[in-house]
Image (spheres, rainbow, N blue to C red):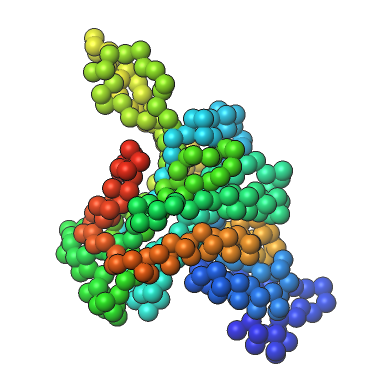
């Protein structure tokens, strides 16, 4: 398409004007195809006039990650391996594939969501403070994070793919993925994917990042949970803290946009019992301003030529470098695990975290 635009003179701007290309994700289906697409597009449009659109980066709560971290002094001192136990990034959908069989089959959850949305969320959660919010400065920090990502040595134990089976959702009986219209009954396409990654740098060495996404899960939710280490010493009787978990800061991307902080508090009464409580910030309660839709914000930025919220080609290629080995492993190792519609994924995903002595949050 872009080559035809060039052939017919539609890609060349008249004097004192511009022509820009906006390209929807996923950009390619692996590293090789992404590099080829980058080459073709860059032959037609200057690099600064190419906008790879990831609508998640236009969400207010995603942009708020940077405000939360760098506009406050209380979080940054503990935003590192000395205090953080692990990070969970979840994008769950309660719907099936709908009428998207032609697109979805052969692509799957990992390519459709992890390669772009979730790796971008991880990068923003993990980056160092940029020198400014100029696109080049922000991209430079995200590239450092993506370049430092380390895959698990045993992909069989620390990655999981699944397919939803028949079940009940929203009071209705729904069919499994292989019984959806237009789906090959022998398809190995994943409708659920969970992976464990680490970031080899001074801030995050040894802290696992667990990324998961899936369709036909318990409810629609996207969140980033930064789970902190347990206190090194508790001067309480063991029975007093039986219901006390780990502190956590949870950024709710959608649908209930906001931030929750979980911490321990004494239960009222004569006995000394400590239990988890939450402190909650909700966008809808704190601000009267309406948030623009993600695509509204991003398309306006295209018109203004502001590339701050758009992944550059290096980010896209590094993301495929992370995902490609996992996809290649899955292609040669059995079939996706089955999980019932309306649940929270295959038991293999729970076992993946249990091996590390952890468990998934229930959003």
User: In the image, what residue occupies the spot 47% across and 34% down?
Assistant: 84
Q: Is residue 75 visible?
A: no
Is 131 rendered above or below residue 247?
Answer: below
353 or 262: nearer the viewer: 353
Above or below 156: residue 355: above
User: Which quadrant would residue 220 be assigned to in this image?
Assistant: bottom left
Q: Position of residue 124 (x, y in %)?
A: 56, 48
Instruction: Say if 122 sits above or below 312 in the image.
Output: above
The C terminus - image quarter: top left
- Classify the position of the N terminus by image quarter: bottom right
Residue 117 image point, x, y percent: 49, 58
Foreground pick, 278 / 297: 278
Q: Residue furthest top?
A: 270
* Residue at the image position 31 percent from the left and 52 percent from the top: 349
Residue 22 visible at all: yes
Which residue is drawn at the image coordinates 33% and 66% (left, top)?
A: 333
Q: Is residue 348 left or right of residue 310?
A: left
**Relative image position of residue 60 (x, y in whole percent):** 53, 49
Q: Residue at x 44, y 52 (%)?
A: 153
The x, y position of residue 163, in whole percent, is 28, 64
């Amino acid at each position: 398409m872009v080559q035809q635009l060039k052939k017919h003179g539609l890609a060349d701007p008249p004097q004192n004007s511009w022509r820009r290309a906006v390209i929807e994700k996923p950009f390619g289906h692996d590293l090789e195809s992404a590099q080829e697409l980058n080459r073709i597009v860059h032959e037609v449009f200057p690099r600064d006039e190419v906008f790879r659109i990831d609508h998640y980066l236009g969400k207010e709560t995603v942009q708020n990650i940077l405000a939360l971290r760098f506009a406050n002094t209380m979080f940054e001192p503990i935003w590192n391996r000395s205090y953080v136990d692990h990070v969970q990034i979840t994008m769950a959908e309660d719907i099936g594939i709908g009428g998207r069989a032609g697109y979805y089959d052969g692509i799957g959850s990992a390519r459709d969501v992890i390669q772009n949305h979730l790796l971008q969320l991880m990068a923003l959660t993990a980056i160092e403070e940029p020198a400014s919010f100029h696109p080049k400065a922000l991209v430079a920090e995200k590239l450092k994070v993506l370049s430092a990502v380390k895959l698990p040595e045993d992909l069989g134990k620390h990655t999981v793919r699944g397919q939803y089976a028949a079940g009940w959702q929203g009071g209705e009986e729904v069919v499994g993925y292989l019984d959806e219209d237009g789906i090959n009954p022998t398809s190995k396409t994943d409708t659920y994917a969970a992976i464990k990654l680490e970031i080899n740098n001074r801030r995050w060495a040894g802290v696992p990042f667990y990324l998961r996404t899936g369709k036909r899960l318990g409810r629609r939710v996207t969140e980033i949970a930064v789970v902190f280490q347990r206190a090194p010493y508790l001067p309480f009787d063991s029975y007093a803290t039986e219901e006390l978990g780990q502190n956590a800061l949870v950024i709710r991307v959608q649908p209930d946009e906001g931030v929750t902080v979980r911490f321990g508090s004494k239960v009222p009464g004569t006995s000394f019992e400590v239990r988890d409580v939450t402190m909650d910030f909700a966008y809808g309660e704190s601000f009267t301003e309406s948030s623009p839709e993600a695509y509204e914000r991003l398309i306006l930025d295209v018109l203004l030529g502001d590339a701050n919220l758009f992944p550059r080609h290096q980010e896209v290629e590094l993301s495929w470098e992370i995902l490609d080995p996992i996809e290649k492993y899955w292609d040669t190792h059995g079939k996706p695990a089955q999980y019932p519609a309306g649940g929270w994924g295959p038991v293999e995903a729970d076992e993946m975290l249990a091996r590390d002595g952890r468990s998934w949050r229930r959003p």
